[in-house]
Image: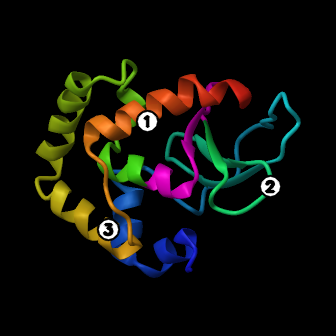
Amino acid sequence: MQSLITAIVEHDEAADFLAWPGDFDLDRGDHVEDVHLASGAALEGFAGDGAGGTYFFCGDGGEERPVLYADSEGGAALVAMGLPELLQLLLVAPWWRGCRAFSAEESRELAAEYVEDMPDLEVRRDRAAAALGLDLPTESEVLARLREVATEAGKDFL
């Protein structure tokens, strides 16, 4: 099975969508300051965003490891249980950082702004998902999963 990171690198359309509107760049894996888990588990930065945030794999293993997002302001949260789940989040709700209440209404408002700037967002998203071999959950499902991971599973990744 091909790694998803390799698939992103090999599919320009997927990489382009993840870069924007996903704000996810595999060339930005270095964080501005040290980040450590209280448990002492290893963190491996593998991607970042334009605002200085970084995505880290937690612990040992491959792309199935939990993913922690640390922003440039000192905040951090577990956002996905593996790279496939993170990519589903970025493809379905690239505006996830603005969804503080994890609500569908909040997400719809943010989505409208993105669609205004990128009317073909859904078409591009679907092509990127197909290139990566990912099935996409609904927006409600991806936000519910984000809430679950960040608030429940995330307690073990402080």
Residue 128: assigned label? 3
| Label 2 element class | loop
Name which residue lies at 70% across and 44% down: 31
Which mark, residue 60? 2
Question: How far is the residue under mark 1 from the one under mark 2?
Answer: 23 Å
Rendered location of residue 71, percent (x, y): 59, 33
Q: Amino acid at mark 3?
A: Ala
- Determine whether, in the image, residue 108 is placed left or right of residue 140: left
Residue 74 covered by magenta stretch: yes
Q: Amino acid at mark 2?
A: Asp
Against 62, is 50 above or below? Answer: above
Q: Secondary structure at mark 3?
A: helix
10 Å crowding of disc 3: few (<14), some (14-19), many (20+):
many
- Residue 126 seen from this side: yes
- Give percent across and percent down for residue 99: 36, 26
- Considering every residue shown, the one lying at the far right of the view is 40
Q: Nearer the viewer, residue 119 or 83?
A: 83
Q: Quadrant of the C terminus?
A: top right
Q: Magenta stretch?
A: 70-87
| Closest to the observer, 96 or 66 | 66
Task: Measure the alpha-carbon separation of dots 3 and 2.
Answer: 28 Å
State the SS at label 1. Answer: helix
- Identify the residue shown where x is 11% and y is 53%: 119
Residue 54 falls inside the magenta stretch = no
Residue occupying the point 15% across, 36% down: 112
The x and y percentages for residue 130 are 31, 72
| Contact check, label 1 and label 3, Cβ < 8 Å | no
**Badge 1 is on which residue?**
145
Q: Quadrant of residue 34?
A: top right
> Which callout, 1 or 2, points at the residue further toward the start of the chain?
2
Dot placed on the residue nearer the N-terminal end, 3 or 2: 2
